[in-house]
Image (cartoon, rainbow, N blue to C red):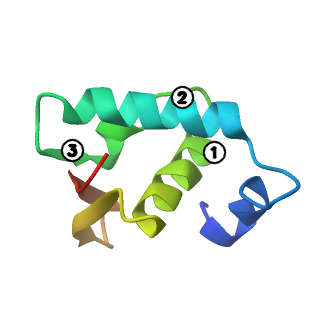
Amino acid sequence: MYNKDNFTHMFSDNNIHTRYFVETIIHVQNKFKYQSICTLEDLLGLGDSWHNRACIDKLCELDYICVVDDHEISNYRTYRNLRL
């Protein structure tokens, strides 16, 4: 099961996966190019989805995208582009 805290080491000062994070940003930008709201499944799509999901959570923390709707039962989320 995905736990955001398990991936905090990805963004520490000593261990940032810059290339993976930048690739995720580009992928998310392309998804938001033609639509204003995307699902989590739309934004996942680069290799390891757990790492990709951690990058998406980081984009939310940085206020580049935001969660519009979160259905906890079905694990279905929708996101809106804020300033990406």
Residue 28 position within the rendered picture, expressed as x and y whole percent measured from the top left: 36, 36
Furthest-left residue in this view:
35
Question: Residue tagged by mark 3?
Answer: 38
- Few, some or many residues within 10 Å of mark 2 (<14, 14–19, 20+): some
Residue 78 higher or lower than 25, as above or below:
below
Report the amino acid beneath label 3.
Cys
Distance from disc 3 to disc 2, alpha carbons, whole Å, reads 17 Å
Residue 65 spot, x, y in % from top left: 31, 57
Image quadrant where one finds the C terminus: top left
Q: Which residue is mark 1?
A: 51
Disc 1 from disc 3: Cα separation: 18 Å
Residue at disc 2, secondary structure: helix
The residue labelled by disc 2 is: 23
Q: Earlier in the sequence, mark 3 or mark 2?
A: 2
Most foreground residue, 26 or 68: 26
Q: Secondary structure at mark 3?
A: strand
Q: Residue at x 29, y 63 (%)?
A: 66
Amino acid type, mark 2: Glu
Separation of marks 2 and 1 at Cα, in angstroms: 12 Å
- In the visual, does 34 lie left or right of 58? left
In this picture, is 8 found above or below 43? below
Figure quadrant of residue 63 = bottom left
Residue density around tag 3, few if under 14, some if 14–19, many if 20 or more, within 10 Å: some
Check if mark 1's residue and mark 3's residue have beta carbons within 8 Å. no
Mark 1 belongs to which amino acid? His
Residue at 41 percent across and 63 percent down: it is 60
